Amino acid sequence: MNPEEFKQALAQHEIALTAKQLGQFALYFQLLVTTNKQFNLTTITAEPEVYLKHFYDSLTPAFYVPALRDQPLTICDVGAGAGFPSIPLKIAFPQLQVTIVDSLNKRINFLNDLVQQLGLTGVKTFHDRAETFAGKKSAHRESYDIVTARAVARLSVLSELCLPLVKIGGQMIALKAANARTETAEGTYAVQQLGGQIVQDEAFSLPVTADPRHIIVIDKKKPSPKRYPRKPGTPAKQPLTAPM
């Protein structure tokens, strides 16, 4: 997928990118590849793959959650890595207010430089573990309209990291690949324990490669119990599962 095909593919979903926005994506690609030579941000570095598997893929939540397109939502991206999905969403929909949390300082430094170079405003970054960022005494707890996560952990783990950050009435959006149906079945208990309810599981394929993708949308129905998230590392080692 080259930049023109990227533009056309989004236009089919009624997302129209300006010349300025396309320029921002082009600069994003250049900065990503340049920085990746210094330390590992991504294994995907060829332009067609970056545009498809990073940029286009990051914008797919807007296909199924239309409020992302025009509402001034507060978004928290947990474990954003090189900025996916939050920075592509911010470029395409500048009214979004974005907060990014990542546990690796090198990535945060890259993102701070990226945001400055792209001329983006309304983006904050935090070097922190999701477990402490969403802790019971955190000012960020239950304060975001939408919390996103892409390729961070399976849903049973992800729910504990993300749902405590979502305000009541807000949503968690998980970007998943082929095994999403299994994850959804296994993760339903954790979602419910954390005050959420799975309301959408949108299955689709990426253009060009036909790689399977899922957008899982979870509504935050009630407060997350104060005991969650547990201390760093525990959610991954001991995921919340239904008692036998």
Image (cartoon, rainbow, N blue to C red):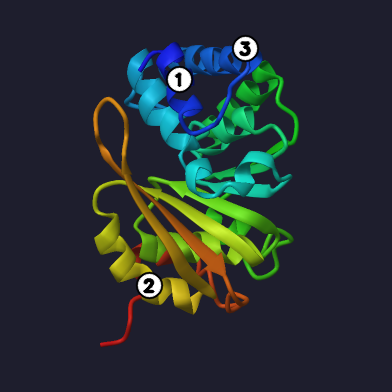
Residue placed most toward the observer, 190 or 220: 220
Horizontal and vertical percent for residue 198?
A: 44, 67
Residue placed most toward the observer, 121 or 38: 121
Lower sequence index among marks 3 and 1: 1
- Residue at image position (46%, 29%) is 12
The Cα atoms of the two marked residues, 2 and 1, are separated by 36 Å
The Cα atoms of the two marked residues, 2 and 3, are separated by 42 Å
Query: Which residue is identified by label 1?
Result: 8
The Cα atoms of the two marked residues, 3 and 1, are separated by 13 Å
Query: Which residue is identified by label 3?
Result: 19
Horizontal and vertical percent for residue 45?
A: 36, 18
Quadrant the C terminus occupies: bottom left
- In the drawing, does residue 102 fall left or right of residue 243? right
Q: Amino acid at mark 3?
A: Ala
Horizontal and vertical percent for residue 162?
A: 53, 59
- Residue at image position (49%, 11%) is 30
Residue placed most toward the observer, 9 or 124: 9
- Asked which secondary structure carries label 3, the reply is helix
User: In front: mark 2 or mark 3?
Assistant: 3
Q: Residues within 10 Å of mark 2 (few under 14, many from 20)?
A: some
Which label sits on residue 188? 2
Residue 6 against residue 146 in the figure, above or below: above
Residue 240 visible at all: no
**Snapshot quadrant of residue 117:** top right
Q: Amino acid at mark 2?
A: Thr
Quadrant the N terminus occupies: top left
- Residue at image position (56%, 25%) is 110
- In the drawing, does residue 28 fall left or right of residue 51? right
Lower sequence index among marks 2 and 3: 3
